[in-house]
Image: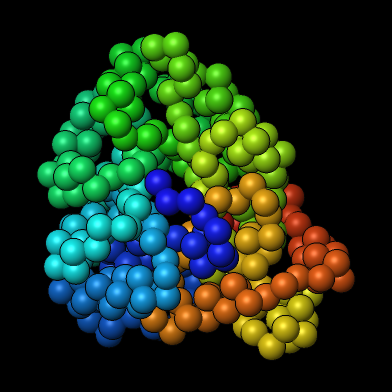
Amino acid sequence: MIPAQTPVERLGLGLAALGRPAYINVGRPDVLPVQRTAQAMRERTRTVLDAAYAHGIRWVDTARSYGSAEQFLADWLRERGHGDVAVSSKWGYAYVAQWRIETEVHEVKEHSLERLRAQWAETRTLLGDRVDLYQVHSLTASSPLFEDMALQHELARIRDSGVQLGFSTSGAAQAETIERAWEIEVGGRQLFAAVQSTWNSMEPSATRALTEVHTGGWRVLVKETLANGRLAVDPPRELAEVADRHGVSPDAVAIAHVLHQPWADVVLLGPASVEQLESNLAACRVELTERDLHALGTLVRDAATYWGERAELPWR
């Protein structure tokens, strides 16, 4: 794991919007290649990874369900030879869209021992020993993992091999999931050492839980910092006004708001182009004032409403 110091060293690149032809991020289709073939998306992923590395980003987050993202990342690491990039991946969802944009189902979730064994083997085949953090994808308080002792012990086997374990969260009950996962111990120590949660100016409901586990020694990764692009493409007036005061675009302010949180160890960006990445990176030079923070504090939505709206975002 890489200690974070400067703002850019706290940033990571997420590959959810790059490894497959369709995703729910707003503002993504307009910047992608006209023909989203596997080769075109591979080239785009390589270009964005190169730009991120050149700017100092040394963390990349992927998942088995991000289409061919693990393959793209593995190819890039092998071609470039970068040994200083931390990699996190996830298991639990399977990509089933077969590179189609228009399809009813894009991914299928299953937290089972069989899925873990199969996907960990697939990840290791592609990325070898480059995985620093392996995460349960979208853990919820109702996940069978909490009661499945065989699954917990299999995860502990991976942990004991030297790979840190974590989980990502989604939904209005993120805090409850984090609190339950904190209590899981296998072999006399905590099963997990990291959590990746959604936190942004509209959805800060997990703040207390994330603060507590960070204080307790867990690494905290933050995803969906732009609310799947909504804060960038259709920013609330208050956010746009803060951006105007700082001479940057709204996405930079939204990311700066996450960077302002002392418990946020790795702040994930999800650009689909180099231009989006460079716009995001302007966050590193934004120093939010008390006036700015007050304005951003007015954007908070009810968590259930926020997640209900997110569920309606189309795959495009």
Q: Residue 164 appears at what percent x and percent y?
A: 37, 35
Asked if residue 237 lies left or right of residue 17, the reply is right
Q: Is residue 85 above or below residue 120?
A: below
- Quadrant where the C terminus sits is bottom left
Q: Is residue 291 above or below residue 69?
A: below
Nearest the eye: 247 or 17: 247
Q: How many marks?
A: 0
Residue at image coords 35%, 48%: 88
Q: Residue 243 appears at what percent x and percent y?
A: 71, 81
Nearest the eye: 3 or 286: 3
Q: Is residue 107 above or below residue 50?
A: above
Q: Residue 247 appears at what percent x and percent y?
A: 69, 88
Residue at image coords 42%, 75%: 55
Residue at image coords 72%, 83%: 246
Asked if residue 62 lies left or right of residue 38, the reply is right
Nearest the eye: 180 or 193: 193
Q: Residue 13 appears at what percent x and percent y?
A: 41, 63
Residue at image coords 56%, 64%: 6
* Camera sees residue 109: no
Q: How is the image coloured?
A: rainbow
* Camera sees residue 190: yes
